[in-house]
Amino acid sequence: MRTLTVGILEMGIPPEGYREKYGSYPDMFSQLLSKSDSQLSFKFFPILDGDIPGDPQQCDAWLITGSKYGVYEDHCWIEPVSDLIRAAYSADIPMIGICFGHQLIAQALGGKVQKSDKGWSLGVTEYQIHNKMPWITDDSDRFAIQAYHQDQVIELPKDTQVVAASDFCPYAALNFNGRAISFQGHPEFAAQYTKALLINRRGLKMLPRELSTQAIENIDKPIDQSLVGTWICQFLRHKLSA
């Protein structure tokens, strides 16, 4: 297997003090994906510091992380990253989007995202698989990962298929015409990091107390973190060997 370089677009940073204990979001992804594919290498791009790649050919694939920001907000880096997404899609360079990244790929390609009137999805969340993709090579019909979001994709771009859904989030995992995949949940989040994040944000009154407390109490329920990491790696290998 040849080595593939994955460019990780760092769209957000953990709360102060958390990076030292848990690592950055690119660190979390590189650790997760390396468990399934040791032939991946990674380049980190701190987007909020202005390090925005202009050439989609710079890496073999791209991964767009989560963020505390909304994709519909007015930030100077939203449109340049959206341009990169559209250029990579046109050049058939594979992309993976997670949470904010899931939403930004959808929006950049013509979909719509908004703050959901359903409120927050927090903690361990199960999704049902609706369309079995070639990179899902096991017999799974559902999976569970950590969730932390209020925004949702509400309209799909053209040529986009729903891979997985829940009653709360009908567009929870997407396949963009075989050129990109995305997940609303966070396969990179371990239970201890999610718990710390929930406690931090609940203390600042950013999250509903009852909902966040329930998520904290159930934080150690089994999740399919490694399985989703394997699916992402299999998508990249399947795509780049086709």
Image (cartoon, rainbow, N blue to C red):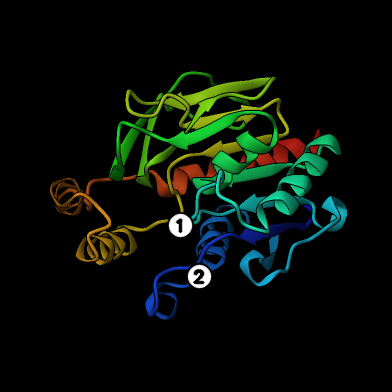
Residue 164 visible somewhere in the drawing: yes
Depth check, front residue: 115 or 162 = 115
Mark 2, mark 1: which one is toward the viewer? 1
Q: Which amino acid does label 1 sit on?
A: Lys
Which residue in the protein does label 1 denote?
A: 68
- As drawn, 63 above or below 160: below
* Residue 124 position within the rendered picture, expressed as x and y whole percent measured from the top left: 28, 44
* Residue 116 position within the rendered picture, expressed as x and y whole percent measured from the top left: 38, 34
Which residue in the protein does label 2 denote?
A: 24
* Residue 125 position within the rendered picture, expressed as x and y whole percent measured from the top left: 31, 38
User: CA gap, disc 2 to disc 1?
Assistant: 14 Å
Depth check, front residue: 116 or 47 = 116
Q: How crowded is mark 1: few (under 14 residues within 10 Å), some or many (20 or more)?
A: few
Quick one: SS at disc 1? loop
Residue contact at pointers 2 and 1, CB within 8 angstroms: no
Left-right relation of 157 to 221: right
Location of residue 93 (image quadrant): top right
In the rendered image, the quadrant that contains the C terminus is top right
- As drawn, 43 above or below 107: below
At x 24% / y 65%, what residue is drawn? 204
The numbered dot on residue 206 is none
Nearer the N terminus, badge 2 or badge 1?
2
